[in-house]
Image: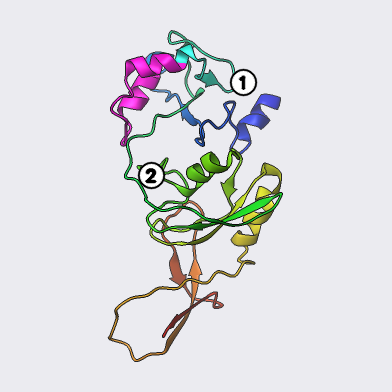
């Protein structure tokens, strides 16, 4: 029962954050099990869409040598370990080369629980797809030494502005809930060359976003988004 409860805990990992990066969790598909751990992870690495060219069999063996490939209960496994269907394996990815984002991330406020930083344009908030190291979360973890740093909300990669990070897991849920319930007021400013409107113009609408979906949508209902063109 204890293992099952841990398995369901969101964000659980038996490996710590390393150099600002969370470990990767992969599950063995039933159609390939049983399979040797080395063969399974080599296939995972080789089929990554964004793969470091040096992440080869030698690099994978080094992970095993460092005991940085583990199963759910944190037990290190060996290249020859036979994995069963639906078994979870944890290891560290090697990020592919990324385009440098040549901007700093100034910290504008910090206390014992939170940190507020000014994210520049062209920098993603969280690691995703081809943007891993050049993200606000990873860069701030590395510069501050706070491995538990996590954003309470997100800004699009091309959007600059203030990001609120929590410094401890214990307070993360409370701040994330504030944003989820829209109890935090956010103001966006855009400068654009658009001459087809007689200004000023005010648009009032209701925006909704389903967790797990990237794109939001406009729906009928009480206004929760106001756009002003001046």
Q: Residues within 10 Å of mark 1 (few under 14, many from 20)?
A: some
Q: Residue furthest bottom?
A: 198
Residue 35 in view, yes or no? no
Q: Is residue 136 above or below residue 68?
A: below
Q: Which mark is residue 73?
A: 1
Range covered by the magenta-colored residues: 39-63
In the picture provided, is 117 more to the left or to the right than 110? left
Magenta-drawn stretch contains 47? yes
Residue 32 forms part of the magenta stretch = no
| Image quadrant in which the N terminus is located | top right
Name the image quarter holding residue 189.
bottom left
Residue occupied by mark 2? 131
Rendering coords of residue 127 (x, y %):
44, 43
Q: Quick check: 65 above or below 2?
A: above
Pick the quarter of the image with the C terminus. Answer: bottom left
Near-viewer residue (5 or 156): 156
Horizontal side of residue 222 vs 6, given as left or right: left
Coloration mode: rainbow
For the question of whether residue 58 can be seen, the reply is: yes
From the viewer's side, name the closer residue of 205 and 130.
130
Crowd around label 2: few <14 · some 14–19 · many ≥20 (10 Å): some
The residue drawn where x is 28% and y is 86% is 196
Left or right: 200 in relation to 170: left
Q: Position of residue 191 (x, y in %)?
A: 37, 75
Q: Residue at x 44, y 47 (%)?
A: 135
Residue shown at 39%/29% (left/top)? 94
Q: Main secondary structure of the magenta part?
A: helix
Vertical side of 36 occupied by 137: above or below: below
């Amino acid at each position: 029962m204890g293992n099952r409860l841990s398995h369901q805990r969101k964000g659980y990992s038996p490996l710590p954050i390393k150099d600002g990066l969370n470990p990767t969790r992969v599950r063995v598909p039933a159609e390939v099990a049983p399979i040797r751990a080395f063969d399974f992870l080599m296939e995972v690495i080789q089929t990554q869409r964004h793969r470091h060219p040096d992440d080869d069999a030698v690099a994978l063996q080094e992970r095993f040598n460092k005991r940085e490939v583990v199963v759910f209960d944190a037990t290190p496994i060996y290249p020859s370990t036979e994995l069963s269907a639906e078994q979870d394996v944890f290891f560290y990815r090697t990020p592919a080369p990324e385009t440098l984002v040549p901007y700093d991330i100034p910290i504008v406020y910090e206390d014992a629980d939170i940190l507020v930083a000014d994210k520049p344009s062209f920098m993603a908030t969280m690691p995703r797809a081809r943007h891993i190291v050049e993200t606000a979360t990873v860069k701030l973890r590395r510069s501050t030494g706070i491995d538990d740093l996590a954003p309470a909300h997100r800004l699009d990669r091309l959007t600059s502005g203030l990001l609120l990070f929590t410094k401890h897991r214990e307070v993360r849920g409370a701040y994330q809930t504030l944003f989820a319930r829209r109890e935090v007021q956010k103001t966006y400013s855009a400068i654009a060359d658009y001459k087809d409107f007689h200004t000023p113009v005010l648009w009032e609408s209701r925006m909704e976003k389903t967790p797990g979906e990237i794109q939001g949508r406009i729906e009928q209902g009480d206004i929760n988004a106001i756009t002003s063109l001046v």
